[in-house]
Amino acid sequence: MSYQYILVDQPAEGVGRVRLNRPKALNALSSPLMDEVNEAMLAFNSDPSIGAMILTGDDKAFAAGADIKEMDGMTAIDMLMTVSLIERFEMQRLSKPVIAAVSGYALGGGCEIAMACDMIVASETALFGQPEINLGIIPGAGGTQRLTRAVGKALAMEIMLTDRKLKAEEALHYGLVNRAAPLDEYMDVAISIAQKVARRSQVAIRLTKEAVNKAYEMTLEEGLAFERRNFLVAFGSEDKVEGMRAFIEKRRAEWTNR
Ligand code: DAK
């Protein structure tokens, strides 16, 4: 499959990577680019040889937001009817974990897509923000919800109402990202985390991801019931039998993802 706005590869066994590739526009998330990301991520999600994915940009920009030049000429109804990734795409809905490797700008829709991933690795140059307020709009792809859950109401308000931007170290401090790493290391860190995920049972990984995401959407009681159900599904898997036998026999487990 050849793409115009993204690069797709497998930097390590079991790891699929999608790189946004519109450097001249700081990887602004145009509809055609979004459609390509959607297609590539869905393809990885249904490829049995892939256990985890990385979504990234380049060193200067993860993504500077939705494409303002595209949105400039659009009406609200155009926006409503546009089948764009930013409107429809939720990394969270993919069954396999997605790690955002963020360097440079992650603004507006860029920040929102990173937050919709399961983990974020930031380079030291990463800058997170929701500057929509400067354009007379508000975040529309999860910013008001995910950022608030991630960093708390007070800071989220400041970021969204005053365009305060968070550097990598601050983002780490406030729990928005998993790791902050030097520019020449952040991708290796992301790949290493993705490999750790990809080496596990895809059955158990999928059930875990699902249950963790429910923590945002359910009461504790409902969430615990959901977790118990997923636990029992995992307990009935062939990988459970293999995992426990491998432990007892002091060998590495050979997962069949069944
Ligand atoms: N869209 C289009 N082009 C962009 C862009 C963007 N978001 N960001 C940068 N570019 C382009 C610039 O126009 C420039 O292009 P040329 O003029 O060279 O043709 C090129 O990238 C380089 O940018 P600059 O010259 O501005 O570079 P600087 O280093 O001086 O500044 C900057 C970098 C990131 C601070 C600056 O470019 C900037 O402020 N960019 C805009 C950031 C921003 O406001 N982002 C939020 C966009 S609004 C929705 C859900 C969500 C959304 C929409 C709909 N629905 C549910 C439907 C999301 C909205 C947003 O993300």
Image (cartoon, grey):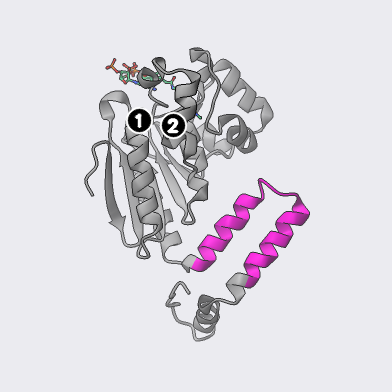
Image-based side of 204 in relation to 67, left or right: right
Indicate if the residue with disc 1 has its beta carbon within 8 Å of ligand 1.
yes
Using the image, tell me which numbered label, if any, was put on residue 110. 2
Q: Residue furthest right?
A: 221
> Tag 2's secondary structure?
helix
- Near-viewer residue (251 or 140): 140
Q: Is residue 168 magenta?
A: no
Q: Where residue 144 sits in the image (x, y, percent)? A: 60, 29
- Near-viewer residue (12 or 141): 141
Q: Is residue 213 magenta?
A: yes
Indicate if the residue with disc 2 has its beta carbon within 8 Å of ligand 1.
yes
Could you tell me the amino acid type at mark 1? Ala
- Near-viewer residue (94 or 149): 94
Q: Image height check: is 163 above or below 206? A: above
Q: Where residue 164 sits in the image (x, y, percent)? A: 54, 20
The residue indicated by pointer 1 is 61
Whichever of callouts 2 and 1 sits on the residue coming sooner in the sequence is: 1
The residue segment tinted magenta is 203-232
Q: Where residue 113 sits in the image (x, y, percent)? A: 47, 37
Could you tell me the amino acid type at mark 2? Gly
